[in-house]
Amino acid sequence: MSEQTGLLKSSLSKKYLMAISGLFLILFLTQHFIINLLSVFSAEAFNNTSHFMGTNPLIQFVIQPILIFGVVFHFVMGFLLEKQNRAARPQKYAFSNPSANSTWMSRYMILSGAVIFWFLALHFYDFWFPEINTKFIQGDMSGLSIDGNFRYHEELIHKFTNPIRVSIYILAFIFLSLHLLHGFQSAFQSLGARHPKYTPCIKNLGTLYAVAIPLGFAIIAIYHFFSH
Amino acid sequence: MKLLLKIWRQKNANTQGKLVEYVVDHVSPDMSFLEMLDVLNENLVDKNEEPIAFDHDCREGICGMCSLYINGRAHGPQTGVTTCQLHMRSFKDGDTIYIEPWKANGFPVIRDLVVDRSAFDRIIQAGGYVSVNTGAAQDANCIPVSKQDADKAFSAATCIGCGACVATCKNASAMLFVSAKVSQLALLPQGKIEAKDRVLNMVKQMDTEGFGNCTNTGACEIECPKGISLENIARMNREYLVATLSSEK
Ligand code: SF4
Ligand code: FES
């Protein structure tokens, strides 16, 4: 069993776990984006989907805990790795020129990650905690507001009337984009998925994803801000 | 050329080092970087001062002994060369040049610019070999190797163990070196037999030596004087994944 414990401790296993949790979060982000997009085109579709996502027991009690675990794991592991990596160079160089050989994004994953972390705290405060409060503390699973309509779209619009909140969200999306610009393709390399035929494609897809998805999120936020 | 050098001086592993300024004059652009340091050292000896300790051996880019973090980059501003292959024509008259040793937990400073790279030797000892039975060697043609694999194995084998990859990595990770050593054997039939144990043992030793974790910045590939590709790191990641899941140890 000696190597078995090494399985989770070794530097490579940590890479795999960072990559797998990262790819999982990318999948989640895609799903989140699609639902957000609905809010632009049809309040009804957005309401129905939100109600389904918020009340379906499989999603609430199986997928949601896995997702929260994935998020927490990716953050905690990211910080632990950063700590170890800093310890691997106890004495810093007096003069260093890292931009000569690597991108800003690849070197500052911890910074973009930390910004996303604080954004998530705000995001949970905005949407997740009130949702949990209404559903599980007050026990109102109906998803209806006082006027008898679904409340989800209305709540969303309400949040995006505040210019400060919208600005913070947009700033966070910029950092999300920087994080993904490196993270998407890096996850594949970590898992050893590198091939002369497919890697260029994965890299392009990663860049496209890293730009398009955060930009899309930002546009949706701006749209709601101006249209109401 | 006249240059201002800011050189890291450190008595031994246990003392604190610092940058010390030196001026060196009459430097020819045709000198190699190490020859320029030789000139400086001769001046220091003439003045009864302690010369600067730095590593070197072949001075033709094949042994991997020379090191030096020059103006913030491993082996200086050029890519694809070692410090002994770097010439003073890469600098201008009046330049200030920072010269530091490799800095990494796995490479403790011995003196001035000399670091202890024996961690690499221990990683090789952990698995960088193939076991060969004694007796008459069989005909080499009995072991088919594709040209493509032979070329890739050869490219990986050009790693000279200089440690620039570790020095330049923001995490002081030794992945490029270890992956080159894993790959050069894993690609060939002779190395396949011990492939699983090799990658497990070498990675374990790498972690024990206190190198950091790879975050795929790609800096190592750019600074490696031998152009060792990140493809090797991906191969090692694959090898380790399979080995760690399937090995009985
Ligand atoms: S991989 Fe390149 S930089 Fe690293 S030790 Fe080998 S030759 Fe030097
Ligand atoms: S002295 Fe041998 S590689 Fe530079």
Image (tube, grey):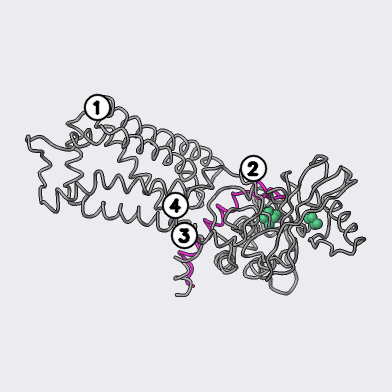
- Taken as a whole, is the magenta stretch helix, strand or loop? helix
Q: Pointer 4: what residue?
A: A19
Q: Give neighbour class at mark 4: few <14, some 14-19, many 20+ (Cα, 10 Å).
A: many
Q: Mark 2 highlights which residue?
A: A100
Dots 1 and 3 on the same chain: yes
B77 to B58, vertically: above or below = above
Residue for point 18% across, 34% down: A154
Element type at mark 3: helix
- Of badges 3 and 2, the one in the foreground is 2
Q: Residues within 10 Å of mark 3 (few under 14, many from 20)?
A: many
Asked if the residue at tag 3 contacts the one at tag 4, i.e. Cβ–Cβ closer than 8 Å, the answer is: no
Query: Please, what secondary structure does the residue beneath circle 2 have?
Result: helix
For image coordinates 24% across by 27% down, the residue present is A41
Which residue type does callout 1 highlight? Phe
Dot placed on the residue nearer the N-terminal end, 4 or 1: 4
**Front residue (pair B196, A136):** A136
| Amino acid at the residue labelled 4 | Ala
Q: Is mark 1 within 8 Å of ligand 1?
A: no
Q: Determine if the magenta segment contains residue B191.
A: no
Label 3: chain letter? A
Which amino acid, by three-letter code, is at mark 3?
Lys
Q: Residues within 10 Å of mark 1 (few under 14, many from 20)?
A: few
Chain identifier of the residue bearing label 1 in the image: A
Horizontal and vertical percent position of residue A197: 54, 40
- The residue labelled by disc 1 is A41
Query: Which amino acid type is shown beneath numbered disc 2?
Result: Ala
Which residue bears the numbered disc 3?
A: A14
Q: Quadrant of residue B20?
A: bottom right
Give the magenta part as a residue range.
B222-249
